[in-house]
């Protein structure tokens, strides 16, 4: 009996802690907004972060995008062949990439690469008192450290998603047309017919939202690090897990709202 | 904000007042009803055992830590009552050297020392670089402007931190162990620098130190922190003559006495 009570107690506590954490992330987000509205923005810092989040992620995004497109073409082909509808492979790849896989895979890759780095960097700054040093010099850490990272996340994720979409379709084309022998004209025609700009735009809106999530979560976890090097490691792991989960869950709701 | 001073004649004697400060971390009581007045335009040295709460005390003065109860007055303002904006205004009067220097490791030495100048003054870049070089020269580090903090030794980092703390010639400077980890000659040079800077700019300095020699070189007043309170306070002469057993043991470095090590 006592055991059950303890379990319920722990479960309730865990839920409360999660809600509390969501609240604190929201508060951090609001203060990011408030500082964004207060010029001057630190352009140099923003560009530096955009380079880190965006430019340096291009390689992994190209790789994941291309191979995702390729494997989708392969899988789609075996399915559609049963109905003699191979020419639909192109539009399937294109729709899948632009609406879903482009933004989500890009966000997950960038979370692993840049979201984790944000948590690690800010966490190290916290435990080595660099964040305290900012406070002491009357410089706000949200403005100096977090705003540039969030802006970079929101701008660069859609940009990377465009790359991913394009590479995915290209990969699908190369598997579908030369390898599997689908008619090139039909492949492209179906894409033109079935994919409209709205699919792409909505995918990009998702991507921007995911960029917001991964940067805010990464910064939040790093900013609130305690407990030395071990704490930094913990913050980094938690940031990646929480951001990835939030991206996948919010993806469902965004999809439900937009399509 | 650069060297701002109240224009009215200084009649107030105390720049910083700590009143009945209590601070605990979890179960551990670190400050236990601490009272301390820091004189305007003087150097106050705080001594005390390792882990005794000296750094915690310093962080209360600049509002990085909030007391569980008690008040901190800086320039007659209770800083606990301030919002972020007000606190920032107060902090602009301060420079601080952290125990581990806390240099920004994303910036080189120039960027670090220039940081407060770029943040809070409208000086031209050329002038800022000039000031930075001057400060680095004062701490014996000219020529390392382009190195990153990770490329410096512990003692060099500390001196860069020192240069950054005094970059603006703030009104109040807090030094957390400025000479720990430096060789004897450099220790002497840094002590000299603190004394000179304090005198020339009429600064209020709070220095935490373990080094008995340094204590008497730089301090106008000395305060001993023990078990969360200031147990002895006075001029170097008074401290040297004190018969307080804790202080005697601390200054002589003896294992015999009220301070138990293990
Ligand atoms: N943020 C914190 N969280 C929990 N405990 C802390 C924190 N900061 C300090 N402490 C504890 O408070 C006590 C005093 O720490 P403090 O750093 O002030 O010591 P100190 O007098 O500066 O020692 P040292 O001379 O070695 O630097 C220590 O026992 C430390 O564990
Ligand atoms: Mg200390």
Image (tube, coloured by chain):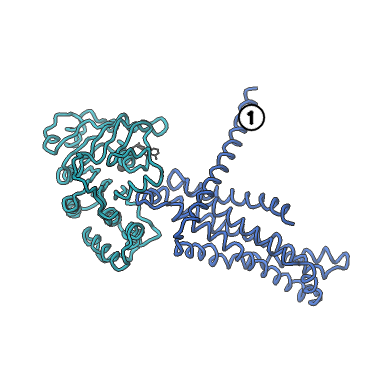
Name the residue at 63% across, 59% down.
A207
Badge 1: residue crowd in 10 Å (few <14, some 14–19, many ≥20): few
Name the residue at 77% across, 71% down.
A192
Residue B22, horizontal then vertical, whole percent: 34, 31
Quadrant of the rendered image containing residue B46: top left
Pick the residue in front: B88 or A155: B88
Above/below status of A198 relative to B79 = below
The C terminus of chain B: image quadrant: top left
Q: Circle 1 sits on which residue?
A: A8
Residue positioned most to the top: A1
Residue B84 is left or right of residue A62, and the answer is: left
Chain letter of the blue region: A
Name the residue at 69% across, 68% down.
A168
Quadrant of the rendered image containing residue B110: bottom left
Residue positioned most to the right: A83
Shade of chain B as shown in the rendered figure: cyan
Above/below status of A174 relative to A102 = below
Chain letter of mark 1 equals A
């Amino acid at each position: 009996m006592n055991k059950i009570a303890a379990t319920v107690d722990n479960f309730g506590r865990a839920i409360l802690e999660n809600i509390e954490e969501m609240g604190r992330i929201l508060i951090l987000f609001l203060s990011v907004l408030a500082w964004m509205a207060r010029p001057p923005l630190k352009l140099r810092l923003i560009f530096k972060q955009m380079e880190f989040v965006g430019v340096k992620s291009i390689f992994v995004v190209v790789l994941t995008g291309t191979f995702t497109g390729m494997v989708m073409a392969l899988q789609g082909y075996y399915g559609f062949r049963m109905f003699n509808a191979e020419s639909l492979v192109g539009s399937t790849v294109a729709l899948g990439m632009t609406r879903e896989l482009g933004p989500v895979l890009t966000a997950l890759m960038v979370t692993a690469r840049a979201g984790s780095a944000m948590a690690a960097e800010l966490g190290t700054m916290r435990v080595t008192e660099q964040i305290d040093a900012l406070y002491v010099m009357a410089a706000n850490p949200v403005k100096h450290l977090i705003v540039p990272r969030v802006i970079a996340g929101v701008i660069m994720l859609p940009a990377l998603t465009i790359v991913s979409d394009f590479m995915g379709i290209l990969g699908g084309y190369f598997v579908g047309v030369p390898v599997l022998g689908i008619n090139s004209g039909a492949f492209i025609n179906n894409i033109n017919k079935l994919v409209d700009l709205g699919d792409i735009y909505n995918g990009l809106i998702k991507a921007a939202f995911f960029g917001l999530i991964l940067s805010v979560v990464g910064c939040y976890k790093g900013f609130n690090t305690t407990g030395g090097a071990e704490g930094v490691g913990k913050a980094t792991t938690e940031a990646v897990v929480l951001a990835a989960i939030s991206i996948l869950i919010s993806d469902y709701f965004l999809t439900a709202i937009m399509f | 904000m650069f060297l701002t001073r109240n224009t009215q004649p200084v009649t107030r004697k105390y720049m910083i007042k700590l009143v009945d400060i209590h601070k605990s971390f979890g179960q551990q009581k670190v400050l236990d009803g601490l009272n301390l007045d820091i004189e305007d335009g003087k150097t106050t040295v705080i001594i005390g055992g390792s882990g005794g709460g000296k750094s915690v005390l310093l962080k209360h003065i600049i509002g990085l830590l909030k007391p569980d109860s008690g008040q901190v007055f800086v320039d007659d303002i209770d800083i606990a009552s301030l919002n972020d904006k007000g606190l920032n205004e107060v902090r602009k009067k301060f420079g601080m050297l952290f125990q581990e220097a806390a240099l920004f490791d994303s910036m080189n030495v120039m960027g670090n020392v220039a940081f407060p100048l770029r943040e809070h003054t409208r000086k031209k870049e050329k002038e800022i670089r000039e000031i930075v070089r001057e400060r680095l020269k004062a701490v014996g580090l000219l020529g390392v402007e382009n190195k990153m903090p990770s490329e410096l030794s512990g003692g060099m980092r500390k001196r860069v931190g020192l240069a950054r703390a005094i970059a603006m010639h703030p009104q109040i400077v807090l030094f957390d162990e400025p000479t720990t980890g430096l060789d004897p000659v450099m220790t002497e040079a840094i002590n000299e620098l603190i004394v000179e800077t304090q005198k020339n700019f009429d600064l209020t300095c709070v220095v935490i130190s373990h080094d008995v020699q340094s204590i008497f070189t730089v301090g106008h007043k000395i305060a001993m922190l023990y078990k969360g309170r200031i147990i002895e306070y006075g001029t170097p002469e008074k401290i040297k003559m004190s018969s307080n057993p804790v202080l005697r043991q601390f200054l002589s470095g003896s294992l015999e006495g009220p301070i138990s090590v293990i």
